[in-house]
Amino acid sequence: MQAWKIRAFSLLFLGCGLPSFSAARAEEEGPLPATLTFQYSGYKWNSTTSKSTDTNGNETERKGTSTLTADLVDSLIYVTIGGKLNLYLYPFQDGNALASVGYMVRDDLELGIDLGLNSTKIDEPKEEDHATLFGAFATYTVPVSNFALENAVVIDMTKLNSSSVSETTGAESTTEINGVFIKASVNAIIPIAKNALYFAGPWLAIDNTKNASSDSKRASSQFGLTLAGLRITVD
């Protein structure tokens, strides 16, 4: 479900709301301070178990492990405005474009939403794909000695509708796939330089999808370890 995990209604909100807000504040106090942060997940290991059920009720189970040293799927860029508002972008994910917006309700607690609205249409041969994602996330940070524990959870609901027309027969086929993605993680955040942080920790993800057109299902769970991640902030 990595492709689903791609976090543009939120972008519309930022594009329409922030300019007027910033302009009003600029007249009173000057422009809002902003920082840009790059996050790279780096070296990762994970174990995956998945079960698929076809239209006849036949079940297939698969298990596997992987070690990745250059996986960019979880890498992201985010902008922090005024120390409170965070805009997250995921430029390396494929498929559906995703954006996330978070707000620091307290210094140690962030709440936010994930939104993705994506559509593709081809006239000849006729083919359409419409993908939507809506979800919520929370991050709670606990200081521990000279580092911090960052606890996060995300829940996303996804939907994919696609249709195509056969060039040979002219018959139209449609597909509707609904899904739920849940992920929880705990990372140790350790300062290593003025504007650089190292992070590492375990995570657990559950991904369930159902094809409403064929009544087939797929359920997978994934346990992983981020062994070496890096965040670099530009003021």
Image: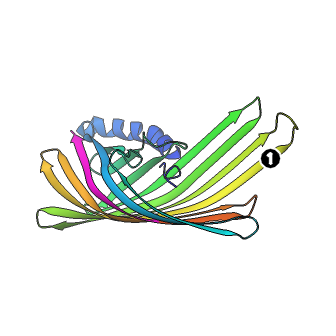
- When the figure is inspected, residue 157 is found, relative to residue 42, above or below; the finding is below
Examine the structure image and report whether residue 75 is included in the region drawn in magenta: no
Tell me which residue sits at (29%, 36%) in the image: 26
Q: Is residue 37 shown left or right of residue 197? A: right
Q: Is residue 35 shown left or right of residue 205? A: left
Residue 68: give x, y in percent of width and height.
36, 50
Magenta-tinted stretch: 222-235
Tell me which residue sits at (66%, 65%) in the image: 217
- When the figure is inspected, residue 117 is found, relative to residue 180, above or below; the finding is above
**55 or 114: nearer the eye?**
55
- When the figure is inspected, residue 133 is found, relative to residue 76, above or below; the finding is below
Examine the structure image and report whether residue 230 is included in the region drawn in magenta: yes
- Residue topped by disc 1: 173
Magenta stretch: dominant SS? strand
Binning the other alpha carbons within 10 Å of mark 1 as few (below 14), some (14 to 19) or many (20 upward) gives few
Residue 11: give x, y in percent of width and height.
47, 42
Residue 207: give x, y in percent of width and height.
53, 63
Looking at the rendered structure, the kind of residue marked 1 is: Ser
Tag 1, which secondary structure? strand
**117 or 19: nearer the eye?**
117
Residue 138: give x, y in percent of width and height.
38, 63
